[in-house]
């Protein structure tokens, strides 16, 4: 028995094509008729049937004509609120049209920017089609893609969001999406070079000064190789020299000209790292220490590509012939789902910390406490495991272990060495947990640490305690003194 909704959708599209046959000039009638089903093929029948054939016709013809010209290497983008008087068709929403070379992360990155601007997404059409253009970028043909069409695939997007009557608001939306599309293109185009740089750094770490133990160097090489094996979505790279700028500035990280890739491509007037100059003294001192070779933390900016979390920062130290730190290789990216799925005990740079904590605890591996400690460590927030040192991990993990199944409130706090955030692990009786309680915790912690914002993650398992991980974003130098208890 045929699907009634799907049948209605096909009948609706037949009505749209009939309008094309009636209204479009003969020169482009056949091409537009073929484009309509390609545009609406993946749309749910319910979404399609809510719109009249006239409006579907207008949207298809609008995108078709917008796609007629596209300069190689650049997207086409426009944001408008269609009306019959001005555009020949109408929508109760504001429409975004994008024509771009097909590449990863276009849809999720565009959607992320729409959400960032506080708008609701009502419809998104995103056919990826085989396109032929002449040397000037004029459209010659559009057809359904085949496996042989990789070199000439284009993404055509029709997106509907809350109607924006203010032209300035539409301009801000267009500007934000254009910036995001630029970041996506930079990250995707430079990905092979960034991966090559990551592998170059691995080779560079094969020859290190005597101030760096071989065990440390080997684990760092293993970690970088693990990242290169599809565990890090590379977004940006640049190289810095640690130099003495003189005067009040003192030492600073100076960009090595021509090294920027991806979202860290060089911008005029940004030769030094302002973030380094703002670091607290203990973090600046860390830059001089030969160890650790690699520093893993979170950057102070959210990703504009793929997902909106704070980007992972991997800084790998560079050394001169005397064994002194001479600069850094800086990689920005996002850990992939496979990175979080792997056992912590098998993950380079993390496995050594876990082994050290287990050895110090001196529990028999087959004992209840031994197994419970392994569970605490394996379920520990993965980002924290990359960033925390062994002493703090031992203190907090044993504190969690001693909580056991007791229904009590407990807070564990870790200060980021760069003072970009404060990590707070809160354990509360699961039955007492609520959204309201989480908001109260966030408010208290944000005020306590002079925070500028906060993110959270909640773990509700079959234990009697709920775990709330709150990350309070802070400004270096502005975190008040506090005691860890």
Image: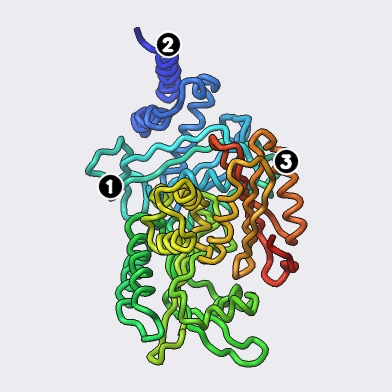
Q: Secondary structure at mark 3?
A: helix
> Which residue sits at x=57%, y=81%?
285
Left or right, 276 with reference to 232: right
- Whether residue 395 sits left or right of residue 296 in the image: it is right
> Is 266 rendered above or below residue 310?
below
Q: In front: 311, or 482?
A: 482
Q: Which residue is mark 3?
A: 437
Residue 38 in sight from this viewpoint: yes
Q: Residue at x 30, y 77 (%)?
A: 206
Residue 121 placement (x, y as % from top left): 58, 36
Q: Residues within 10 Å of mark 1 (few under 14, many from 20)?
A: few
**Precedes in sequence: disc 2 or disc 3:** 2
Figure check: 40 above or below 280:
above
Spatial CA distance of label 2 from label 3 is 47 Å
Q: Closer to the camera: disc 1 or disc 3?
A: 3
* Residue corresponding to mark 1: 150
Question: Element at badge 2?
Answer: helix
Q: Which residue is mark 2?
A: 4
Of residues 35 and 410, the one drawn nearer to the viewer in this rendering: 410
Residue 305 spot, x, y in % from top left = 49, 53
The answer to which of marks 1 and 2 sits earlier in the sequence is 2
Q: Quadrant of the N terminus?
A: top left
Above or below residue 310? Residue 3 is: above
Q: Quadrant of residue 87?
A: top right
Q: Is residue 132 left or right of residue 465?
A: left
Task: Tell me the distance, in whole angstroms, between the alpha carbons under discs 1 and 3.
Answer: 51 Å
Query: Quick check: 418 left or right of 199?
Result: right
**Which image quarter holds the C terminus?**
bottom right
In the image, residue 33 lies at what x, y percent? 37, 27
Q: Quadrant of residue 447?
A: bottom right
């Amino acid at each position: 028995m045929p699907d009634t909704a799907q049948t209605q959708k096909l009948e609706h599209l037949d009505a749209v094509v009939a309008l094309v046959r009636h209204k479009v000039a003969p020169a482009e009638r056949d091409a537009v008729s073929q484009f309509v089903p390609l545009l609406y093929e993946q749309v749910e029948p319910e979404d399609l049937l809510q719109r009249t054939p006239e409006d579907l016709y207008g949207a298809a013809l609008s995108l078709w004509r917008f796609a007629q010209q596209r300069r190689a290497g650049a997207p086409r983008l426009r944001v408008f609120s269609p009306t019959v008087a001005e555009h020949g068709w109408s929508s109760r929403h504001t429409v975004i049209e994008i024509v771009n070379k097909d590449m990863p992360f276009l849809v999720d990155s565009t959607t992320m920017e729409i959400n960032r601007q506080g708008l609701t997404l009502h419809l998104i059409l995103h056919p990826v089609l085989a396109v032929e253009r002449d040397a000037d970028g004029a459209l010659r043909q559009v057809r359904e893609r085949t496996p042989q069409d990789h070199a000439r695939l284009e993404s055509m997007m029709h997106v509907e969001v809350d109607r924006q009557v203010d032209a300035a608001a539409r301009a801000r939306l267009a500007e934000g999406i254009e910036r995001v599309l630029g970041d996506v293109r930079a990250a995707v185009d430079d990905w092979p070079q960034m991966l090559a740089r990551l592998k170059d750094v691995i080779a560079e770490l094969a020859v290190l000064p005597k101030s760096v133990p071989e065990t440390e160097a080997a684990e760092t090489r293993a970690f970088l190789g693990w990242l290169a094996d599809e565990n890090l979505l590379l977004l940006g790279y640049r190289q810095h020299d640690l130099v003495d700028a003189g005067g009040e500035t003192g030492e600073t990280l100076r960009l090595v000209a021509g090294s920027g890739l991806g979202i860290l491509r060089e911008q005029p007037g940004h030769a030094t790292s302002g973030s380094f100059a703002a670091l607290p003294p203990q973090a600046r001192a860390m830059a001089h220490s030969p160890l650790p070779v690699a520093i893993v933390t979170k950057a102070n900016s959210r990703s504009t590509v793929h997902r909106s979390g704070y980007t992972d920062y991997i800084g790998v130290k560079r050394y001169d012939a005397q064994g002194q730190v001479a600069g850094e290789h800086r990689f920005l990216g996002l850990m992939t789902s496979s990175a979080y799925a792997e056992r912590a005990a098998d993950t380079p740079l993390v496995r050594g910390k876990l082994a050290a904590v287990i050895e110090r605890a001196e529990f028999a591996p087959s004992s209840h406490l031994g197994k419970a400690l392994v569970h605490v460590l394996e379920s520990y927030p993965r980002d924290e495991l990359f960033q925390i040192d062994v002493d703090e991990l031992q203190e907090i993990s044993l504190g969690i272990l001693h909580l056991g199944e007791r229904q009590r409130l407990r807070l564990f706090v870790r200060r980021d060495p760069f003072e970009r955030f404060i990590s707070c692990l809160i354990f509360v009786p699961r039955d007492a947990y609520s959204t309201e309680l989480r908001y109260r915790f966030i408010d208290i912690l944000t005020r306590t640490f002079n925070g500028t914002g906060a993110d959270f993650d909640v773990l509700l398992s079959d234990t009697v305690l709920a775990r709330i991980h709150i990350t309070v974003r802070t400004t270096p130098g502005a975190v008040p003194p506090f005691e860890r208890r």
